[in-house]
Each structure stands twice: as C-alpha cells, then as structure tokens.
C-alpha cells in the first residue's frame, strides 16, 4: 500500500523504520519514524506505526497521528477510521475497516500485519489473530515476521506443538536475524526446556550483540536450569 508524504526523505526514513520494526529493532524503528514525522508532520502512517511502539506516550502519539492533514489514499482512510475505532474500543469496527484495506491490497504483508498485531497485542483476540496471520501467509510472498506472531499467538492458546513449528519456520525464513532465535528461546522457556532456551538466546546474542535482552534471558535460563539440576 502506498503511503502519503510530500517528502522523499520522510519516505526513506519511514521505509528504513519499518524494516527495523520487522527485525524487532524497535529503538531504531522509533528513531527513524520519529525523524520521518519531524520531516513531514502530516505523515499519518509514520505516526500510526509509532503508536504500536509507544507506551506512556501513546495518547500523545495518537493525537499526533489523528492531527495529520493530507490527501490520504483509500487504504489510509480506512486505517485512519480503524484507528479512531480502536481508540474508542470498538473492536468489531476496527476489524471491519482493516478488512477493507486488505481487500484493496491483498498481497501487501504490511497491511495484513496491522490487523493481526492489533488483534494480538491490543484486542487479545488470539484466535482471530491466528486466522488473520494464516491468511497473510497464504496471501503474501515470504514474510518471516508473520511466523513469529503466529508462534506467540499459538503459545497463548497453549498449542505448543504448532507454536514450535511456527518458530522453526521463522528461523528457516530468516536464519541471519537474531530475533527468530530469541523467540525460539521464549518458546523453550515457556515449555521449561531451559538448556535449549539458553542455547537459543545465546545464538541470538551472537548474531546481533544489540540484542542485550537475549543475553539477559540466557542468564535467567541458565539459573533455572541449574535449579533443576540434581
């Protein structure tokens, strides 16, 4: 789906920010999206994605997104409406609006991503998220992050065998990235396979030393493993 901005620099920053988001380099993603909004204050989609990464500043980010004033395309108009419904707690209308965007851009993984992240992260509708993710996988080209979201959603429903398959596919699809191994480590921690969790977290940290959270989780896995040892 095209995004509306009058600035080529803002567009470049947005695209690099979204690439960082997909690699779970959220600090870098936030930094680039924030620069994109500073370059073009009416860049709705940049502000919208910042909302996904915000916490205590979420209200401020939401207001910034909704203040954006540009000639939006049809997809952006539906996303903006969905955003308003999300803030009002009208989840069914959120899904309805985002389905319309997917109908417009069925092969765009980023459009699918908006729906299933909202279902998983904001609505806690894990079954709905799983359906949306599976549809995204079937409708788009290879998109590793979808398998990551699928694995976590399946874990929420305690469907561990299927969750492991999803995380393994994530690793297979993006073996050069750190996050697939960090996610598999989370799977092993949840299923109390602490030695394997340690190895997976260390693998993530070895690939990308910026994943200091993986190093911390590896230490925790090691401690739990030692407690279980006779």
Image (tube, rainbow, N blue to C red):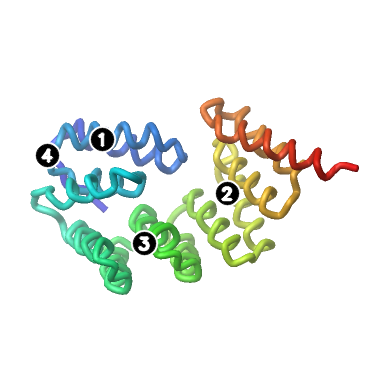
Where is mark 3, residue-wise? 115
Residue lying furthest top: 209
Where is mark 1, residue-wise? 34
Residue lying furthest right: 230
Q: Residue 153 at what x, y percent from top left? A: 53, 61
Q: Nearer the viewer, mark 1 or mark 2?
A: 1
Q: Neighbour class for label 1 at 10 Å: few (<14), some, many (≥20)?
A: many
Label 2 or label 3, whichever comes before in sequence order? 3
Residue 172 visible to an observer of this rendering: no
CB within 8 Å, label 1 to label 2? no
| Between 127 and 142, the one nearer to me in the picture | 127
- Determine the residue positioned at 24% across, 45% down: 61
Label 4 or label 3, whichever comes before in sequence order? 4
Q: Quadrant of residue 120?
A: bottom left
Where is mark 4, residue-wise? 6
Mark-to-mark CA distance, 2 and 3: 19 Å
Which secondary structure lies at badge 2?
helix
Mark-to-mark CA distance, 4 and 3: 26 Å
CB within 8 Å, label 2 to label 4? no
Which secondary structure lies at badge 3?
helix
Where is mark 2, residue-wise? 170
Mark-to-mark CA distance, 2 and 4: 35 Å
Which secondary structure lies at badge 1?
helix
Label 3 or label 1, whichever comes before in sequence order? 1
Left or right: 205, with 34 as reference point: right
Q: Neighbour class for label 2 at 10 Å: few (<14), some, many (≥20)?
A: many
Mark-to-mark CA distance, 4 and 1: 16 Å
Q: Neighbour class for label 3 at 10 Å: few (<14), some, many (≥20)?
A: many
């Amino acid at each position: 789906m095209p995004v509306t901005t009058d600035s080529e620099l803002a567009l470049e920053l947005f695209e690099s920010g979204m690439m960082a988001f997909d690699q779970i380099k959220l600090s870098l993603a936030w930094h680039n999206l924030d620069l994109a909004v500073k370059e073009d204050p009416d860049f709705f989609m940049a502000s919208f994605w910042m909302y996904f990464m915000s916490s205590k500043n979420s209200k401020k980010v939401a207001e910034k997104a909704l203040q954006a004033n540009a000639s939006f395309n049809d997809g952006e108009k539906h996303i903006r409406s969905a955003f308003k419904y999300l803030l009002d707690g009208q989840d069914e209308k959120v899904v309805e609006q985002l389905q319309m965007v997917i109908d417009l851009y069925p092969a765009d993984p980023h459009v699918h991503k908006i729906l299933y992240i909202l279902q998983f992260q904001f609505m806690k509708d894990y079954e709905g998220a799983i359906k949306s993710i599976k549809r995204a996988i079937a409708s788009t080209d290879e998109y590793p992050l979808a398998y990551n979201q699928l694995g976590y959603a399946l874990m929420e429903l305690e469907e561990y065998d299927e969750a492991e398959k999803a995380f393994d596919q994530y690793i297979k699809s993006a073996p050069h990235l750190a996050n697939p191994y960090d996610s598999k480590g989370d799977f092993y921690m949840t299923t109390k396979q602490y030695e394997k969790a340690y190895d997976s977290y260390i693998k993530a940290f070895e690939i990308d030393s910026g994943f200091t959270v993986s190093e911390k989780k590896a230490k925790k896995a090691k401690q739990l493993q030692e407690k279980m040892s006779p």
